[in-house]
Amino acid sequence: MRDSRRARLILGVLLAAALVILTIDHRTGESSPLRPLRAAGSYLFGTAEQFGGGVMRPVSTFVHAILTAPAARERIEALKAENAKLRSGLLAGKLDADRSKELERLVGLAGAGGTRWSPATWSPGGGSPGSRTRCRSTSAPTTGCGRR
């Protein structure tokens, strides 16, 4: 389009008309004489926006899925590794519970025979080969290794 004086004049008049229409519409509020025009424009542009969104939404979703596929695969692998770790921890917890039950059963059997249990730590006696070892009780004084 040629840049002529007439084109600039038409553009200026349209801009001034738009500003006048906006001012009138804004100042009169809900009782605006331009309310039917606003409703028609809202309907027309709203329908066009919904149609455009309906067409573009599947396309943009597809493009987003293609672009994020490698990151999703990495996330899946990380979750699989975490799941395996949690399963092994759960299995270890079950084994610990089974061992605890067995220890409780053994302690109960030892208690039934009149044997006393006291926590003790083991330490080497003299440090030379063939030397005697001794037990140190951590609760009550004992004579020997676990005997009272």
Image (cartoon, helix red, strand yellow):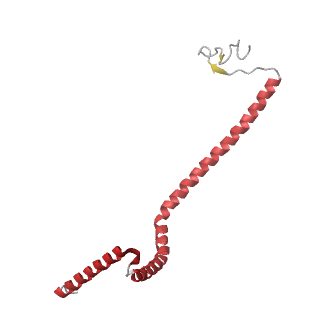
* Most foreground residue, 142 or 1: 1
Indicate the position of residue 73 as horizontal and vertical percent values. 52, 60
Q: Residue furthest left?
A: 5
Quadrant of res 110: top right
Image side of residue 90 versus residue 114, left or right: left
User: At x 50% / y 74%, what residue is drawn?
Assistant: 58
Q: Quadrant of the rendered structure where residue 1 is? A: bottom left
From this view, report whether residue 135 is shown above or below residue 95.
above
- Residue for point 48% across, 73% down: 57
Please, is residue 110 above or below residue 78 in the view? above
Residue 50 rendering spot, x and y as whole percentages = 47, 77
Position of residue 88 relative to residue 42, above or below, is above
Please give the name of the residue rendered at 45% of the width and 81% of the height, measured from the top-left corner: 43
Question: Residue 46's spot in the image, x, y percent?
Answer: 45, 78
Q: Quadrant where the C terminus lies?
A: top right
Would residue 86 be found to the left or right of residue 118 on screen?
A: left
Find residue 30 and report its horizontal and vertical position in percent.
41, 75
1 w.r.t. 24: above or below: below
